[in-house]
Amino acid sequence: MTRMRTMKEFSLIINGDSVATSDHFDVINPADKSVVARCPKATVEQLNEAIVAAKAAFPAWSALTYAERRAKLMQLADALEAKSNAFMTLLTQEQGKPTKGFADLGAGFELGGTLAWIRSTASMELMPETIQDNEIAHIAIHRKALGVVGSITPWNYPLLMGIWHMIPALITGNTVIIKPSEMTPLTTLYFGKIAKDILPKGVLNVVTGAAGEIGEAMSSHKDIDKIVFTGSTPTGKAIMKSAANSLKRLTLELGGNDAGIVLADADIEAVAGKIFATAFINNGQTCAALKRLYVHESVHDQLCEALTNIAGSVKTGNGLDVDTDFGPLQNEKQLDIVKALAQDAKERGANFLCGGKVINETGYFYPITLVNNIQDGARLVDEEQFGPILPIIKFKDVEEAIASANRLAVGLGGSVWSTDIKRAQDVASRLECGTVWINNHAMVQPDAPFGGVKDSGFGVAFGEAGLKEFTSIQTMQTFKS
Ligand code: NAD
């Protein structure tokens, strides 16, 4: 009861204040379809108030040194860490992921990643770059904050994705308005509540609203200087359209359908566990999860058997139960997509090595499912499943596998699995994607740039390249006489 009462107290964060709304919507726990909390539903007028506050806070915040902004962000990381348990529980309730989970990739992983990313990103700094320094002139590139940044996040890693947007924007001197997904807004609102007591008024605002309405108003608003968006390709395209009138800067991290290619010389025993973990990380609801597995015919059966054995040892259930490896899908719509792709595969005569049937209808549960005897052209191969079902496609010649990997419109990540590193790197360099891994997949870290090509978007996150996305160049040419 105490928890339910606390849960009802979420409010918008505007100009350093908790702001109530007259309207609300329910946030559903995907494990049992209960209401976790009522979420404040902002009006466009309230969004406008947040934009006014962020704009007013910008001159003072951007005038601080990196060291001064860093000190505030480090304080924020400490305050968040002190509330770790509450964050993890809330994350499991709104998103579904287990606290610990398979290979320790659950809510604890998201919280740990959040803290690591805040601290690491806040430690970075963009220094002026000198182009020329001689008796004639000193020419240097300076990087200036853009102004007000609008962040729009998805529902798969609600807290971590928000951090990936907010921290590089804030450390470079921008002020922020974040709009989390209406499916998983609570951890971001909770984060905003902690941040309002640490950051100056208006520097970070959290505005939650109805699907599409607030995001669309942000994308078209003349006083938001940049939108950083993570989500689906169709929404990314809609944002780009509405941002055009104000020539807004954009970073679009969109959907993917990453291929993994297992060459004939791969050490199957050594890689099977990693392939499983990176295909099913966050129950498959990960932008750069391994989503199509192309396996050379000589090792196909051995790998299928190894993956099926691992699948037989894991448990799908309520994320609050300590022995749960995988939670439910986050929402009914995503469950329906997974079911439809499985049905199409069945109708095409694909072979289900395990799973494939909904087992528990108290929540949005779908079991870990492995499908072989399937080809390019099946919906499960060609469309992003974003769930716990993996198609395994046999190939004879590596040229076929490379052509298959590159044939789709998306290009986020890809991987090659082999004991011959040089050959693997040669194959990897031919894949059309923003990140390519050898003998791994889906690994990201705060100093390694990450972004997509083709329909997976543009712009990058992380590292110096990621910070630069939140700045504009000012070239200063100082002539000496
Ligand atoms: P989504 O596109 O449906 O929603 C993402 C966000 O956009 C939500 O906050 C939503 O409210 C908002 N939105 C909806 N309509 C809008 C509009 N017209 N204008 C502005 N904002 C709008 O995506 P999702 O279902 O939440 O997330 C799943 C998708 O995100 C998958 O395709 C996945 O691959 C992708 N994703 C990509 C990455 C990456 O880094 N590339 C990371 C995570 C997820």
Image (tube, grey):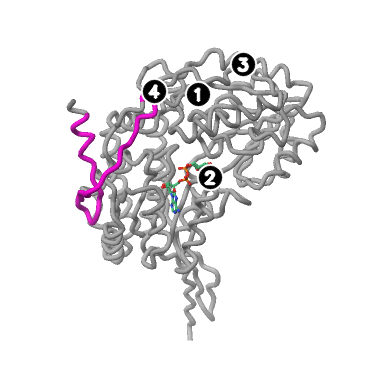
Q: Residues within 10 Å of mark 2 (few under 14, many from 20)?
A: some
Which percent across, then down, holds residue 101? Answer: 44, 23
Asked if the residues shown at circle 2 and circle 1 are in contact, with their CB atoms under 8 angstroms apart, the answer is no
User: Which circle, 3 or 1, is nearer the viewer?
Assistant: 1
* Range drawn in magenta: 4-32
Which of the labelled discs sits on residue 308, or is there none?
A: 3
User: Which circle, 4 or 2, is nearer the viewer?
Assistant: 4
Q: Nearer the viewer, residue 39 or 247?
A: 39
Q: Residues within 10 Å of mark 4 (few under 14, many from 20)?
A: many
Look at the image and say whether residue 179 sits in the magenta stretch: no
The residue at 76%/41% (across/down) is: 403
Q: Amino acid at mark 1?
A: Tyr
- Judging by the rendered image, the residue that carries numbered circle 2 is 448
Q: Quadrant of residue 389?
A: top right
For label 2, the SS is loop
Q: Residue furthest right?
A: 397
Q: Nearer the viewer, residue 369 or 14?
A: 369
- First in sequence: mark 4 vs mark 2: 4
User: Horizontal placement of 60 versus 289: left or right?
Assistant: left
- First in sequence: mark 2 vs mark 1: 1
- Judging by the rendered image, the residue that carries numbered circle 4 is 319
Q: Amino acid at mark 3?
A: Thr
- First in sequence: mark 1 vs mark 4: 4
How far apart marks 4 and 2 lie (CA) works out to: 30 Å
For label 4, the SS is loop
Which percent across, then down, holds residue 227? Answer: 44, 57
Instruction: State which quarter of the image contains the N terminus.
Output: top left
The residue at 32%/28% (across/down) is: 34
